[in-house]
Image: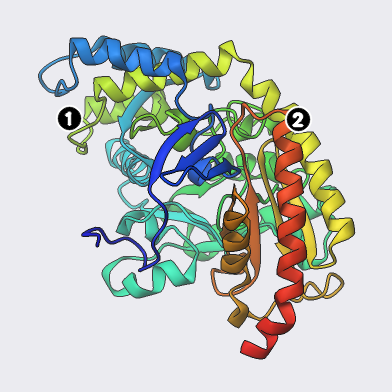
Amino acid sequence: MSHLFYQGRTRKPVLAQARGVYMWDEGGKRYLDGSSGAMVCNIGHSNEAVLEAMRRQMEKSTFGYRLHFETEASERLAARTVEKTPVGLNKVFFVSGGSEAVESAMKLARQHAIATGREQRWKVISRSPSYHGCTLGALAVTGYATLTQPFAPMMREMPKIPAPRAYLDGLDPTDPATGDHYADMLEDCIAREGAASVLAFLMEPVGGASTGALVPPTGYMKRIRQICDRHDIILIMDEVMTGAGRTGAFLGADHWGVTPDIVVLSKGFAAGYAPLGAIVASDAIVDPVLDAGGFAHGFTYAGNPLACAAGHAVLEEIDRLGLIKNAARMGDRLRARLDGLMERHEIIGDVRGKGLLLAFEFMADRVSKRPLPKEYDAYLRFVEIAYEKGLIVYARRTRDGVEGDHILVCPPLTVTNTHLDEIIEVLDQSLQQFTAELPALKEMA
């Protein structure tokens, strides 16, 4: 009997131990963590250097409220974070997770507008599909119907533009005209809403769970930056999943040389060792807010010294172990191996991603891009099959959360060639079993 409840009634084995890329349940069964939890455990499990840094901090203090004390741990992590983000982003605000970070970014942008005499700006444009967190504020900018619809009466939904899913729309993602096509949708939305009312544009540089590692088409990112500049709109980059090296650069936006006005970090930022997130912004954003009376926002655990000590140690390990380069190198190899699976399994209709943020999508027909019938719940069944075989992967629905099935393959950045061999072998076996089950699934549907 359990007194816990989460999303449903499904029970899982009790976790006994986790080391590196592997996890063991109480029965001794080993699992390869092929999704880094929920794309969190970037440096792997039980890294001794991080654990030792946390032990040292615990001997000093585990909590120091930010209105009472400054802490060495939070100051060190803030300075290290600024070193790793683009020039000009030099102010950091800590939180405990991605949803809190997105809320904080939007509130900072709004308070900046008020402090600079632009009170009429309040709309945050985002994309659909997208996922930016589970609080009501974060859901308002999320485009994922199954998660947002139950709470629609409780929130003020924000404007959305289509995510640049060129592969579904039959467009060439390498053609700059494709990038312009999707970026123009932001321009059109600003015109519809009225530029004077638009506060910010929020996006993931590489799509996360909602679009399955969607990489933007050529020219899209720079064009988005230009549009935001032209209309004096704050560009918020949600790097909760892409940040801390997962895509083969510290920030996903770094691949395109685009500097956002506000960066949102979490997940791999502390790699699962402690609840931690952050927003990073410029003096130009922060100073007017502080001069106008301060940031009217905060959380009890903001800047918690134990979490910050863990986060600093994680960033140190990313550098010491060369994990960003490894993410790029191993990501290329894993992508090639997933392409090989696509050649062998017709049910895979697309493979995409960057670095070690990769996904493949199931389709009933590659040419028409027709998804599997949603009644199959294919994404859930495939995850179950892989789990039974000792591989953990992550899955969601690609098309607004209603249909379409993609599988995210995002192992820790410490992954080796041997681990890739194991991942591909189990994926291959799982695909064979899953495909063999499809007739039975059709009968059930």
> Which amino acid type is marked by label 1?
Gly
Residue 112: horizontal and vertical position, in percent? 33, 37
Farthest residue to the left: give it.
68
Residue 264 left/right relative to 208: left
Farthest residue to the right: give it.
343
The answer to whether residue 338 is above or below residue 276 is below
Marks 1 and 2, how far apart at CA = 54 Å
- Whether the residues at callouts 1 and 2 have beta carbons within 8 Å, the answer is no
Determine which quarter of the picture holds residue 247: top right
Location of mark 1 (residue): 293
Q: How is the image coloured?
A: rainbow
Determine which quarter of the picture holds residue 308: top left
Location of mark 2 (residue): 417
* SS under mark 2: helix
Residue 86: horizontal and vertical position, in percent? 55, 22
What residue is rendered at 76% in x and 59% in y?
166
Asked whether the viewer can see residue 239, the reply is no
Residue 404: horizontal and vertical position, in percent? 65, 70
Asked whether the viewer can see residue 28, the reply is yes
Residue 378 left/right relative to 294: right
The answer to whether residue 259 is above or below residue 315 is below
- Camera-side residue: 376 or 25? 25
